[in-house]
Amino acid sequence: MSSTLQELAAERAAAQEAITRLRLAPVMFELGARPHPPRDLYRAYLDQSQVFVGIYWERYGWIAPDMGISGLEDEWRGATQLPKLVYIKEPAPEREPRLAAMLDEIRDDNSTSYRRFSTPGELRELLENDLAVMLSERFEAFASEATSTAAQAARTIRSSLPRPPSPIIGREMEAGTLHELLALDGTRMVTITGLGGSGKTRLSLEVAERFCGDWRVCFVDLTGLRSASLVLPTIAGALGVHDAGERSLVETIAGVIGDQPVLLVIDNAEHVMDAAVNLGEILAATERVKMLVTSRQALHLRWEHEYPLLPLPVPEDDQAGIDAISATAAVDLLVDRARRVRPSFRLTEENAAAVAEITRRLDGLPLALELAAARLPVLAPSDLLARLENRLDALAGTSPDMPQRHRTLRQAISWSYELLSGDEQKLFRRVAVFAGGAGLQAIEAVGAADDIEPATVLDIVASLVDKSLLVSAGDLGQSQTRFYLLATVREFAAEQLLAAGEIESTCDRHLAWYAALAAQAWQRFWSVDMAAWLDVIETEHDNIRIALSHAAGAGDPELGLATAAALWPFWDIRGHYREGERHLRRLLELAPNKDCAAYGRALSACGWLVALLGDFEQAMVLMVEGVALVRAHGDAHELAWSLGEQGNVAFSLARTEDADRLFTEVVAIARELDETFLIGFGLFGLAYVGLLRGDLATMRARLEDSLQLTRHLIQPWGIAWAEFSLGVVSVMNGDTRAAVIQITESLEQRWSIRDARGLAESLQVLATLASGHGELDWSAYLHGAAELQREANGLTILPFLRPMHDESVARLRSALDANALDELWQQGRSAPLEKTVLEAVDRGALRLDDPAILADAKAPAR
């Protein structure tokens, strides 16, 4: 980077920032770089550089006694082999003749890019764009040679890190310092502390992005949590751990992390400070994890390195010119955000002083600057400054024990709130009940009540988005745009909701909306739309937790029971067994009416989850009572489901006659109702009655009937279970070729809905098949992957699959060296689940094309 040292200081800083944003290193000559002669130094710098950037204005530069040209021109001439980007500042009324002649020569040089600019901010934007284009052209060939495996791995690693909606501004130095600190071997935990709205989350994402590729990065948002007891489960969920079984959750988390380096980005920890000890327990349990935490206060753990985040720098000199003002980070952020809502906005000589004063009044806090920028489309900077003056003065001194900057941030939000219309204020504060955002329909149902016209909600939401109080996110892979409040803004909105006396009524509507959503999901689970609806509930899981907590508190526990009972398929398939059980047990205890169908259905749903956790006797007790209540008070559809759920437990307890009776009644009711999935469900249960009786022919016939019905519905869960069970029959009959086809299809179906339990079971049987036909390494790898999946979800091996598993493991132990077996097993545990599933599916396809690989194995002993 070449320029004169005195007249272009702000421009050099802007150019340096543009270069470092692109993860490049600026090489600049400085006068303090003695004792070497200046010419030797800058020529050495040129030899080590890949791009030449020249920045020129009015001065030609100093000519050394032994030279005929200035160092400035000598640098340009010495860069003949480098790509050259030249930027000339205008206007330049006092440009020296030698520089003018040099610029004429540059214009005639076809190898040099030549651009004009007027402010440091404009230079920064031009240079960053030009370098980005140059890099994309120069490295296009290199990028195309990257292997698909590496690209897929990068996508997988980055998938859990939110994508910020705009580039970071003014925090490049902090990001570099934090990255270096966190990368040190001895650093285990760094906590970014600062006021609400100071940019802690955005900075943590910037730092975390630099670890992607070499580390698995998991973002854990604690914003929606109301209890410190939920912190560990939330961290576990981000790592794919939904249940710990008999082990402690900390031990399970450490086991899942294993030997892979993991960076946990834990956001907004200040309101669950009691959970700090849990973070220390994770750090103590495994050396392969680092933590990057954001909090308004330090956690005071012995692992912790605190990094206080100060406000952005603001202009200090009241008489500073536009160049000095534009070079400060707070002004840069304000102008950037203003141009996003008003593209024609520019920093000018006329408005620069007002803009500088705005940033000072808002103490350089990013959130306050964002809110202020949202008003610039309708207010001139001087008018905005006048409003800020009034509002800030009105709050001064009201809370002596509150930090001054916090008062300023609260006042900025309060000012925006007070500018809203009455209906805008109502909707804004009511949106605070949502955790993780919500779609427009949910906001209409919960926010409108009886005092806002539903038809106006869309306009109000659009207005709140325009005013930066509500954030829209349409790139999350969802079918609809979601809207959410930033963390600090949500806190302010919740305070207003409480002050207005509306919190209970708003939470009631919130519960009613998610109860209706759960009922709709129950109906759609048993169709081709199952995967989509599981994703809907996953997206809304935080909101559902809040709704159920309200139902168990000041809300309607009976409505909460119906909601929780409808969600057992989600809790089952996505591995949230214990969480679902906890919700159901708490609501069952609080329910005022224990003699109704809703109570009976909740008992059956709770029994289903208890059975999945291995306590079949307790599950049967719950289900017997549940079926009796549903038979007395419920409809035929509810009764059929309750009977089928009890039948599954009877099978697990090997109560053959009970299972036969229960599933026979399910089929009879389902046929009367003409419920296709229920018929298939009942036939599936009767198939397993055949297994209990040792009648594999009957089992196969009923499974094929069940499969035909679920294929008609294109229902992935039913197809997966039928194919898996047919594969088990094929294994028992020694037909490994058919088993590979069936188990592989079950694996594909289960992956399509992310069925935690089913994936473990399909991988387990594939491991058995692999050991049976001699693929010992692959079998050990799959056993490790299946074991990890069971541990992550608190599962045990189903009783009827245990003999197959044990014989397969014994076969491996007798054929492989213990160290080799352990290494292969650990490889399966540490591999990403998606990679294992895709490889298993590919191997299954290859086996079908090569019968020699499929030498029939002796059926495992039963």
Image (spheres, rainbow, N blue to C red):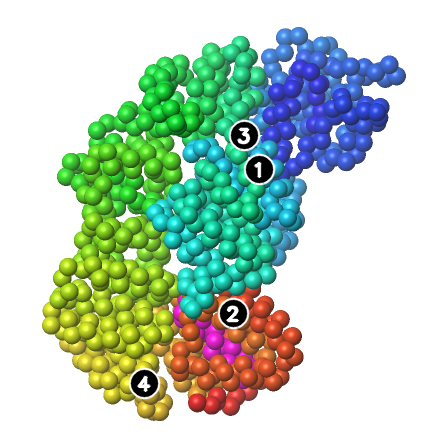
* Location of residue 209 with respect to 396 vertically, above or below: below
Q: Secondary structure at mark 4?
A: loop
Image quadrant where residue 426 sits? top left
Disc on res. 170 = 3
**Which of the two discs, 4 and 3, labels the residue nearer the N terminus?**
3
Picture coordinates of residue 237, whole percent (x, y): 43, 57
The 10 Å Cα crowd at callout 1, few under 14, some 14 to 19, many 20 or more, is: some
* Location of residue 377 with respect to 479 vertically, above or below: above
* Label 1, label 3: how far apart the Cα atoms are: 10 Å
Would you say 550 lies left or right of 53 here?
A: left
Q: Nearer the viewer, mark 2 or mark 4?
A: 4
Q: Quadrant of the N terminus?
A: top right
Question: Majority secondary structure of the magenta segment?
Answer: helix
**Which of the two discs, 2 and 4, labels the residue nearer the N terminus?**
4
- Determine which residue is flagged by label 2: 785
* Label 4, label 1: how far apart the Cα atoms are: 60 Å
Amino acid carrying label 1: it is Ala
Task: Look at the image and give the residue range highlighted in magenta.
Answer: 756-773
- Determine which residue is flagged by label 4: 654
The 10 Å Cα crowd at callout 2, few under 14, some 14 to 19, many 20 or more, is: many
Q: Quadrant of the C terminus?
A: bottom left
- Is any part of residue 441 visible from this angle? no
Picture coordinates of residue 574, whole percent (x, y): 38, 63
- Is any part of residue 302 visible from this angle? yes
